[in-house]
Every structure is written in C-alpha cells, then in structure tokens.
Image (cartoon, rainbow, N blue to C red):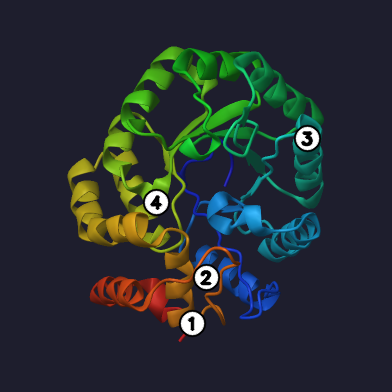
Amino acid sequence: MGRPYRGVFPIAPTTFRDDGELDLASQLRAIDFMVDQGVDGICILANFSEQFALTDGEREQLTRAILEHAADRVPIIVTTSHWSSRVAAERSRRAQELGAKMVMLMPPYHGATLRADEAEVFEFFARVADAIDLPIMVQDAPMSGTTLSVPFLARLAREVPQVGYLKVEVPGAASKLRALIAAAGDAIEGPFDGEEAITLIPDLDAGATGTMPSAVVADQLGRIVRLYLDGRRDEAVALYERYLPLINYENRQCGLRATKALMKEGGIIASDAVRHPTRPLSGPIRDGLLELARRLDLMILRWGT
C-alpha cells in the first residue's frame, strides 16, 4: 500500500509468556493474523502494545523480528515516543533502518508533571524529522497531559512537512479533526482517529480517512472505513452499529487486555499475560467479553483453530 496511508492500522499487542518473558512465536502469529484480517497496516510498540513495560533491548528485538516477519506484506508504523528528543530521534532512525514505513510519537512528557511547552514540542518533532526520511504521525492523546491546539498542530504540519499524519483521540475528536482539516488543508496527509474506534462514524464524518484501533475487529473496521470512503455511509453505519457494543465493552471495561484475551481464546497466542502492575482481566469481565465476541462469531476466535 502506498501513500497516502488510509484505512485501518490496528495496534499489535506485545505477547508474553506466563512468566512475563517475551513470546516471539506468539508475536509473529499475531502479526500473521492481523495481516489476514486484511488490514491496511499495523502499528507496533504503542501504548496498547504495553510499550511502557518493555526494556530498550526488548523494543529492538520486537522491532527487528516483526519487521522481518511482516516482510512488507503491510506497512508497519513503529511508535518511538520518549521524553528526550535525542532518544526519540535515535529510536526513529533505528525504526527506519529496520524497514518501518512511519513512526508515531506523542509529545514529550514524563510522569504527571514533566511537560514541554509549545516551542519545545515543535522543536522536538522538528529534530525527529531531521533524523529520518519517514512520515511522522503525531499522537494527540490524553495520556501525555499535553494540550495540542488546532493552530499549533496546523502550524506543525505546514512547517515540518514530514508531520503529515495525526491520530486524534481526545474528547471531542470529531470537532478537533474537522477544525484541523480546515486549518491545515493538504498539509495533513492522513487524519486518523483512535481509542478503539469508539467514535469512528462521527470522526469519518469530520474527514478522518483512517483509524487505529486494536486488532479485535480490525477486519470489520476496515470494511466500515472502505464503505464510508466509497460513499456508502448508510451501509458503513449499519455495520458499525453491529459491532459497537463490543467496541464499547473493550474500551470501557477491558482496555489493551481484550485483544490478548480473545487471541488466546482463539488459539492465536499461547498466553494473554500482561506485565505487572497491570492485572489480567477478572473472570466476570472476561466472560462478558467472550459472550459478546462469540455472539458476533469473530474472526479472532476462528483463525487459530
């Protein structure tokens, strides 16, 4: 798939064994499953990949293994967020060397109080751009605690040409996407939403051309985006409404653990382990997730069996 990238780019989970060590065999099966979902690309090492629970050595190991295994079947976006401009630039350079087609970063932050001001955020992205030849996706998410205003993001896209992609997953995402597209115009190559695609239809109405959800129903979300972009909005809405109760349950009850629980249930990965202090799903929440998934006869439950 060539640029501009659009459609569905789900986030790959990071798979662990029950003892907490990386499980590369399961990791590569998860990538194969996502490719078979018909996705337009895959994002790795994101927050939903538990990137905050990985060592630098594990990041390197995963990036290399996944990019070699994907073998250009789909474009891979590597998340390279870090507080340090130098480390973020080096991570991004290394991702490019290993074959990534894009990098994604949040604005620099650390903990609850360490933030950069607008001038520093601008220079952060400019320094990353200077280090690579890849497009950059800015992740506008509440986790960073940094407000990225519409005028600032529009200026960033206009003045740092590699910043052509924006993943907007803040409250009022549709309104912000609409305002960004109006303010930045063609400087924004790919307006995306995120947060498990829980606001996908209003975000598409606002002009989004892509979504970055989990892998739970990425096959169906891809169909929805394609229908919408083909001008078949009513069909897209009807299909989305079929899966919305599951998407809502994932977003509000499970978070990143939903993908792993369903991949394990479907025989794709060996363990749904998460790294402490993140806790596994409780029995009742897992049961509710499986009930919804079985009712929909999801591909994620059938692919590995």
Q: Earlier in the sequence, mark 1 or mark 3?
A: 3
Contact check, label 1 and label 2, Cβ < 8 Å: yes
Residue with the mark numbered 1: 304
From what the image shows, is residue 274 above or below residue 60?
below
Q: Which residue is mark 2?
A: 33
Work out whether mark 1 precedes mark 2 in sequence or the reverse, and give the earlier one. Answer: 2
- Which amino acid type is shown beneath numbered disc 2? Phe
Q: Residue furthest bottom?
A: 305
Residue 265: name its quadrant: bottom left
Residue visible at 50% across and 50% down? 9
Q: CA distance from mark 4 to mark 2?
A: 18 Å
Among numbered discs 4 and 2, the one appearing first in the sequence: 2
User: Horizontal and vertical percent for residue 36?
Assistant: 50, 67
Which of the pair 64/37 is nearer the observer? 64
- The numbered disc on residue 89 is 3
Badge 4 element: helix
Q: Nearer the viewer, residue 14 or 201?
A: 14
- Rendering coords of residue 175 (x, y %): 32, 25
**Pointer 1 local density, CA inside 10 Å: few below 14, some 14–19, many at least 20:** some
For marks 4 and 1, give the CA distance: 23 Å
Which of labels 4 and 2 is toward the front? 4
Going 31% across and 50% down the picture, which residue do you hit?
Answer: 224
Q: Which residue is mark 4?
A: 196
Rounded to the nearest whole Å, what is the CA distance between mark 1 and mark 2? 8 Å
Q: Secondary structure at mark 2?
A: helix
Mark 3 and mark 4: Cα distance apart in space: 27 Å
